């Protein structure tokens, strides 16, 4: 499949035979190559156009045209799999695969040859808008190392599929991406925003060097349909460092090259020169104030914890009635509009992942008239994290919040049967206060112990 160097080579191949010529007519042998236009309309449009230049944008060939001395759009040619352009003498033996032919005023013809018919040959009044989706041209001066490093940082995709994306950078395909990644020593699965600046510069240089050298060698010859002005194939395939060389020794280090599949494309690499991405250190776990977007995560943890803690203690239908959806609404409300100005919900989070939550605020107990008793109302962490100090962290956060709000003491309630939780609070300086209390909620009575501690 032709990539930038092959398309550039074909543009250079046909340019001398086209510039300065006038189109005298068109023959269309496969109308779908016109991308929707009728053969009659295409021929009427093409007749009389002067050809002013032949250029390339990404993998497209642009044949600039004018009429009566005024610029008038361009033929836009996308070769896709097997499309080729040839300028032929009129008496040349006709190829059965010519899909569109333009007759020229010197008696020669421009042939759009396309065995598999995926290519397109259209005339566009506004070629720039047709190609507006394309990313930067990798060989232009504006494509600087700075600009490329910025682009890499702005995306969070694996390098290979990102470089194949024509909207990210135009013109690269499977061959030259594999070659560039090897030259830069970057694994195809490295994430773009984690590529260090030095490596981004190396990749920028590699892309430009590989493409420049491939153009100099008139592209790579990968099938019988590709040919250069002299009829001989491009020769860059002799330079391939990795592409198509799975199992053969790396030209840099000698290790056997590997072939893997990335984003559905055969991908060739050296696992020594292009080490696999290391999993970066996990983001730090930290406690912070909850925001409404945390409500769903909090609700999931809350429901799971309640079902585990209250199983057998309250009628099962109460637990079955607890749904994440219902809890999420409650928590959205609680976080968005706290019932008291002193109320706050905290989450323990690693990156965007919520691992636990706590909330704290004015005591729900009415007997705090003696003064400013705050309450840590709930602390839940995911079961797999229990025993790693995460609960202590949330708890310290909640207590600090109460202290800042001017509370003199804090209370907590613990299910009487939950020895572990009671030990946790006793270790934090809480003492039983008035013995057992019984909480009546949702029609179920649960034996709870009230614990109290002064806040320094
Ligand atoms: Zn190697």
Image (spheres, rainbow, N blue to C red):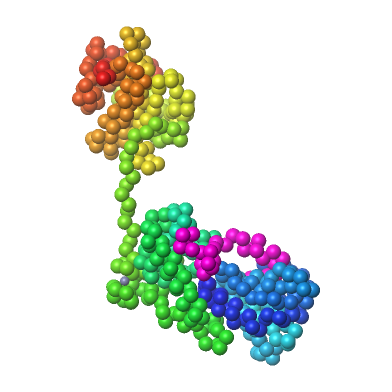
Give the quarter of the image for residue 159: bottom left
Residue 426 drawn at (x, y percent) = 21, 22
Q: Position of residue 249 (x, y in %)?
A: 31, 76
* Residue 155 drawn at (x, y percent): 46, 54
Q: Is residue 356 left or right of residue 326?
A: left
Q: Is residue 377 visible?
A: no
Image point (32%, 63%), residue name? 275
Magenta-tinted stretch: 120-148
- Residue at position x 64%, y 83% in the image: 16
The magenta stretch spans residue 348: no
Q: How many marks?
A: 0
Of the four image quadrants, the one with ligand 1 is bottom left
Residue at the farthest bottom position: 91
Vertical order, 247 against 283 (above or below): below
Q: Is residue 210 visible?
A: yes
Report whether 203 appears left or right of 375.
right
Q: Residue at x 38, y 41 (%)?
A: 353
């Amino acid at each position: 499949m032709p990539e930038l160097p092959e398309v550039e080579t074909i543009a250079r191949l046909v340019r001398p035979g086209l510039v300065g010529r006038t189109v005298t007519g068109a023959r269309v042998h496969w109308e779908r190559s016109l991308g929707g236009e009728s053969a009659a309309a295409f021929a009427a449009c093409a007749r009389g156009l002067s050809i002013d230049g032949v250029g390339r944008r990404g993998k497209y060939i642009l044949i600039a045209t004018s009429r009566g001395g005024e610029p008038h759009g361009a033929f836009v040619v996308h070769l896709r799999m097997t499309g080729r352009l040839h300028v032929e003498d009129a008496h040349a033996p006709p190829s059965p695969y010519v899909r569109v032919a333009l007759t020229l005023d010197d008696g020669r013809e421009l042939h759009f040859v396309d065995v598999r018919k995926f290519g397109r040959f259209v005339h566009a009044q506004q070629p720039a808008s047709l190609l507006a989706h394309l990313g930067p041209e990798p060989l232009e001066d504006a494509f600087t190392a700075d600009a490329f490093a910025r682009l890499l940082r702005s995306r969070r995709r694996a390098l290979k599929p990102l470089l194949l994306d024509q909207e990210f950078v135009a013109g690269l395909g499977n061959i030259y991406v594999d070659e560039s990644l090897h030259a830069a020593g970057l694994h195809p699965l490295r994430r773009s925003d984690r590529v260090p600046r030095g490596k981004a510069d190396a990749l920028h240089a590699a892309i430009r060097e590989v493409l420049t050298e491939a153009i100099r060698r008139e592209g790579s010859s990968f099938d019988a349909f590709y040919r250069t002005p002299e009829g001989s194939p491009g020769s860059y395939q002799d330079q391939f460092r990795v592409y198509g060389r799975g199992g053969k020794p790396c030209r840099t280090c000698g290790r056997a090259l590997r072939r893997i599949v990335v984003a559905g494309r055969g991908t060739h690499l050296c696992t020594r020169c292009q080490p696999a991405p290391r999993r970066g250190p996990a983001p730090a776990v930290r406690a912070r104030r909850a925001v409404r977007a945390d409500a769903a995560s909090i609700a999931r943890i809350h429901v799971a914890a309640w079902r585990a803690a209250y199983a057998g203690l309250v009628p099962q239908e109460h637990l079955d009635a607890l749904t994440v959806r219902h809890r999420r609404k409650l928590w959205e409300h609680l976080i968005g509009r706290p019932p008291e100005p002193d109320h706050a919900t905290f989450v323990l989070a690693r990156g965007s992942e919520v691992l636990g939550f706590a909330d704290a605020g004015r005591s729900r107990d009415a007997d705090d008239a003696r003064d400013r008793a705050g309450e840590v109302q709930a602390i839940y962490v995911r079961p797999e994290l229990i025993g790693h100090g995460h609960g202590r962290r949330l708890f310290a956060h909640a207590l600090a919040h109460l202290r800042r709000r001017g509370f003199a003491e804090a209370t907590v309630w613990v299910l009487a049967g939950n020895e572990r939780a009671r030990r946790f609070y006793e270790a934090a300086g809480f003492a039983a206060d008035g013995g057992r209390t019984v909480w009546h909620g949702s029609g179920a009575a649960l034996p709870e112990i009230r614990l109290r501690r002064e806040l320094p």
